[in-house]
Image (cartoon, rainbow, N blue to C red):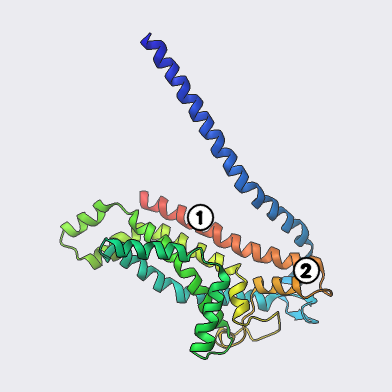
Amino acid sequence: MSALASTSQVRRKRRLESLVLGLTGLATLVIALPVVIVMIYVVSNGAGAISWEFIFHGPERAGREGGFWPVIVLTMYALILAAIFAVPIGVACAIYLAEYARAGLLLRIINLTIVNLAGVPSIVYGLFGAALFLDVLDQDKTLWVASATLAIQALAIIITSVREALIAVPAGLREGSLALGVSKLRTTAFITLPQASGGIITGVLLAISRAAGETAPILVVGAILSTNVTLNPVDAAGGRAQMLSFELYGRITEGLGFEEERKWGIALILLSIVLAFNVSALLLRARIQRASRR
């Protein structure tokens, strides 16, 4: 009887495992299928517009002809500036919250607030950036203002992801280092941070890739459609913001006179940049994890 009972239990467990596996596979399909459909649709509609001129030439006839090279370059400038603004502050905040802050109610409230900030609509960050930089600080509508606004939005994602990566580092590594007389600062710098580097890099790249697709913040702080401008980084930082996300929004809403294929071409370039950030994050994380196992 006991043998029959154990066999029946094994069968039930296998059925349950098969059911759970099927449900998780279905959930994955439900999530992945719309993404794949959107990608195929964008590629099929925009691939015809992609050419050397479309990517590497400047706009002509108010963007109705020529290419979008200035917008692509200024988009990368904006993302680099956003990373320069957000990464040091975000990583420093995450280190303090994960390694130095005293556990308690206040810390839980701070962590919950940061997590909630990651879900705030981007238009709210745009309004905050406009109020802070344009009204309070009386700055002009420039690329660096748009980048700083995007950096504020990226902070919550960076802090959350870096903090989780630091917490995931085994406590035994910290304790062993401290037991050998190494200071808390050096332990954090040379033990904890290298161990968490994969998660840190992934979080930063994902935050910047999200910023690449945002339209509302730069719309509020005064972005413009494509024009031939200087691509010198110093001069560009003081000029008006031009980004692919706003370019796509502007071309869709401006009405007639702009070919549909060119709109899809802009969308394809933007999608390629976002995918490049995401794939880079996955590859870097995998490479760092393999290196840490050696």
* Circle 1 residues within 10 Å: few <14, some 14–19, many ≥20: some
Front residue of this view, candidates 14 and 78: 14
Q: Position of residue 220 (x, y in %)?
A: 61, 79
Q: Secondary structure at mark 1?
A: helix
Q: Position of residue 120 (x, y in %)?
A: 52, 66
Q: Height in image: 8 above or below 168?
A: above
Q: Residue at x 70, y 63 (%)?
A: 268
Q: Residue at x 41, y 52 (%)?
A: 289
Q: Position of residue 182 (x, y in %)?
A: 19, 63
Q: What kind of residue is marked 1?
A: Leu
Q: Position of residue 140 (x, y in %)?
A: 57, 89
Q: Is residue 258 shown to the viewer in this render?
A: yes
Q: Residue at x 72, y 58 (%)?
A: 42
- Which quadrant of the structure image shows residue 218? bottom right
C-alpha separation, residue under disc 2 versus residue under disc 1: 30 Å
Looking at the image, the residue that sits furthest to the top is 1
Whether residue 248 sits left or right of residue 10 in the image: it is right
Per the image, the residue denoted by label 2 is 262
Exactly how many numbered labels are in the figure?
Answer: 2
Q: Where residue 282 is drawn, which disc sits there?
A: 1
